[in-house]
Image: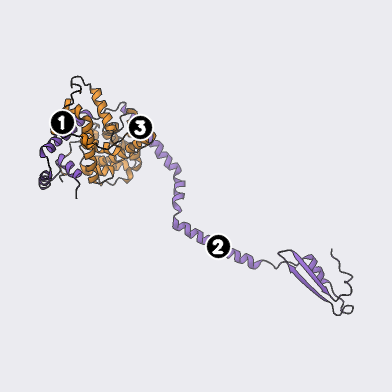
Amino acid sequence: MNRGRARPKMDTEATAAEADVPELDLVRQAQAGDTEAFDQLVSRFRTRVFGMIYNMVHNEQDAWDLAQDSFLKAWKSIARFRGQSSFYTWMYRIVMNVTIDALRKKQVKGSGAEFNDEVQLKEIEPASRTVPHGDALPHERIEQKEIRGRIDAAIAQLSPEHRAVILMKEIEDMQYHEIAESLGCSIGTVMSRLFYARKKLQNLLRDVYENV
Amino acid sequence: MKTFEEKWTAWIDGELSDAERAEFEASLEDRAAAEAEKDQAHKLGAFLKEQLQPRAMGNEEFFHHQLRERMAAETNEPAQSRPSQTRESWWTIRRLLWTGATSLALFAICTFFVMREQPEPEPSQYLTQILNARVDSNVSPNATVSIFQTKQDRVTVLWVDGLKSLPSDYAAK
């Protein structure tokens, strides 16, 4: 399996001077209790972390709170970071744990109607026979907000684990092994989840992405 | 052994080696449909990537400020609670066992010494009077006096046989 593919350079929000400091140095300083160094790490990852969580929970306030919880948890346990993976992957593991836990709790409180990962295979027609739905709105009339609403609604039907996998793969361009590390599961599980998540989203969003 | 789902995903993402890809593609019943499905998966990926760009976080300064406050609170809190945590962690199972065994041994030793040094219980006042009472052998040559005492029931029985009269100086006080 080809794992050598380079991931696009990660965008960070640090200033040029801050960006000069290697990530591992900042981690070492943070491990020694340097809050300023940790603050720089937060600056580098906050938008990606917040964006990832937002795509999982679809609520700005929840995303804010969960991003806070994730960074706080990272600060409390940074001494245990051994550098066996990148800080980015380690951080994502925390983010995923916090977010998936929150979604699970929400599911328990809610109706439980969400997270139906069952793919109704009979509904998924081979692409060769797929045509845009006749009643779909023309792309000129589909507002960005509506598109986003459709995507959010489709993702909301995935389980937290399936959401995490598809977002990490498609949005974050993470490799299978990085996703597996972040979620604490096997590469095979990641690939299997990706299969079902894609099928489900194709089924739910085909009319949208075919028309946009 | 990879499952079909794993192979399919790796095929979509171009993660199969040449040999694996050739083998997988040969196993597909409808290659054209599969290729179209692959194309759909790529379209979905591109669509999600385009639409789900990282959302800008509003008020970033406040985010940092809030986080720093919480970090400071967390840093101070463990410092205050550290002694109790240390105390809790000191009691390992082994230490608990040793402490328990040592306590039992000390208890046994103390009990032994206390029991050994305990004085003989004093006879009751009643018994003392009886024992001190002298039976006049001239008056009652065949007199016998027996005492039965059950301490647990707090009963003392004086069995007197052959006495013509009780000693004059005997009286239960």
Outermost residue toward the front?
A122
Closer to us: mark 2 or mark 1? 1
Q: Which residue is mark 1?
A: A130
Output the chain of dot 1.
Answer: A
Q: CA distance from mark 1 to mark 3?
A: 41 Å
Do the residues under discs 2 and 1 have CB atoms within 8 angstroms? no
The residue under the point 79% across, 65% down is B125
Q: Which residue is mark 3?
A: A65
Q: Are marks 3 and 2 on the same chain?
A: no
Output the chain of dot 2.
Answer: B
Q: Is residue B27 above or below residue A156?
A: below
In the rendered image, which quarter is residue A91 located in?
top left
Q: Position of residue A53 (x, y in %)?
A: 29, 33
Query: How busy is the neighbourhood of tag 1: few (under 14 within 10 Å), some, or many (20 plus)?
Result: some
Q: Are marks 2 and 1 on the same chain?
A: no
Q: Secondary structure at mark 1?
A: loop
The chosen color scheme is by chain
- Of A129 and A201, nearer the camera is A129
Query: How busy is the neighbourhood of tag 3: few (under 14 within 10 Å), some, or many (20 plus)?
Result: few
Of the residues shown, which amino acid type is indicated by label 1?
A: Thr
In this orientation, does residue A172 appear? no
State the hue of chain B. Answer: purple
Does residue B17 appear left or right of residue B56 in this picture?
A: left
In the rendered image, which quarter is residue B93 located in?
bottom left
Does residue A47 appear left or right of residue B34 in this picture?
A: right
Of the residues shown, which amino acid type is indicated by label 3?
A: Asp
Q: Is residue B98 above or below residue B69?
A: below
Q: Position of residue B89 (x, y in %)?
A: 44, 51
Q: Is residue B169 above or below residue B103?
A: below
Q: Secondary structure at mark 3?
A: helix
State the hue of chain A. Answer: orange
In the rendered image, which quarter is residue B116 located in?
bottom right
